[in-house]
Amino acid sequence: MKIVLFDGECGICSQSVEFIFAIDKKRVIYFAPLQSAVAAEKLAQKGIVTPDPNTFYYIDGQNLYSKSTGVLRLLKDIGNGWQLLYLLMVVPRFVRDFLYDRVAKNRHRFLKKSACALPPQALLDRLL
């Protein structure tokens, strides 16, 4: 199962989930807030007891990816042209993650509200 673990208290993160849902034409990506029991269980299986709310986690079955690598692996799996962004993997991880960290650290400044409109039922069906 392919799962995106996201900060459920972040407006930008919630909007990102809606965006991922919209571009996932194969309908294979599931979602779970970091604050959920599902996320705690999945991360504990990978040795993460206290997840970082500033970190995007992506599980593609057996593998756990985080930050920029998680985003790029997700886009590769989604396909539909998005996999071309996977070419950014040639950029050293420390550079990609530096940029990722800057956005993640300031994400609450970009969108002040944490509560979002109720997502469509089809998305709720893939929320774990």
Image (cartoon, rainbow, N blue to C red):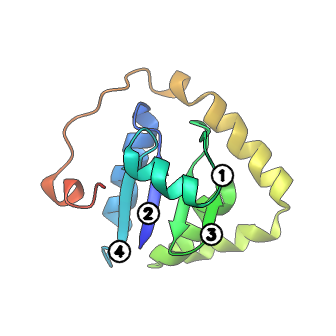
The quadrant in which the C terminus is found is: bottom left
Label 1 – label 2 distance at C-alpha: 14 Å
Q: Please tell me whether mark 4 or mark 2 is closer to you in this view.
A: 2
| Type of amino acid at the residue the image marks with label 1 | Lys
Label 1 – label 3 distance at C-alpha: 15 Å
In this figure, which residue is indicated by the disc labeled 3? Answer: 85
Residue 123 in the image: x percent, y percent?
Answer: 23, 56
**Depth order, front residue of 45/113:** 45
Q: Please tell me how crowded label 4 is: few (under 14), some (14-19), or many (20+) other residues with Cα within 10 Å.
A: few
Label 3 – label 2 distance at C-alpha: 19 Å
Q: On screen, 24 above or below 20?
A: below
Q: Please tell me whether mark 3 or mark 4 is closer to you in this view.
A: 4
Q: Please tell me which of labels 3 and 2 falls first in the chain.
A: 2
Label 3 – label 4 distance at C-alpha: 19 Å
| Type of amino acid at the residue the image marks with label 2 | Ile
Q: Please tell me which of labels 1 and 2 falls first in the chain.
A: 2
In this figure, which residue is indicated by the disc labeled 4? Answer: 28
Q: Quadrant of residue 76?
A: bottom right
Q: Secondary structure at mark 1?
A: helix
| Type of amino acid at the residue the image marks with label 3 | Leu
Q: Please tell me how crowded label 3 is: few (under 14), some (14-19), or many (20+) other residues with Cα within 10 Å.
A: some
Q: Please tell me which of labels 1 and 3 falls first in the chain.
A: 1
Residue ID at (22%, 35%): 117
In this figure, which residue is indicated by the disc labeled 1? Answer: 67
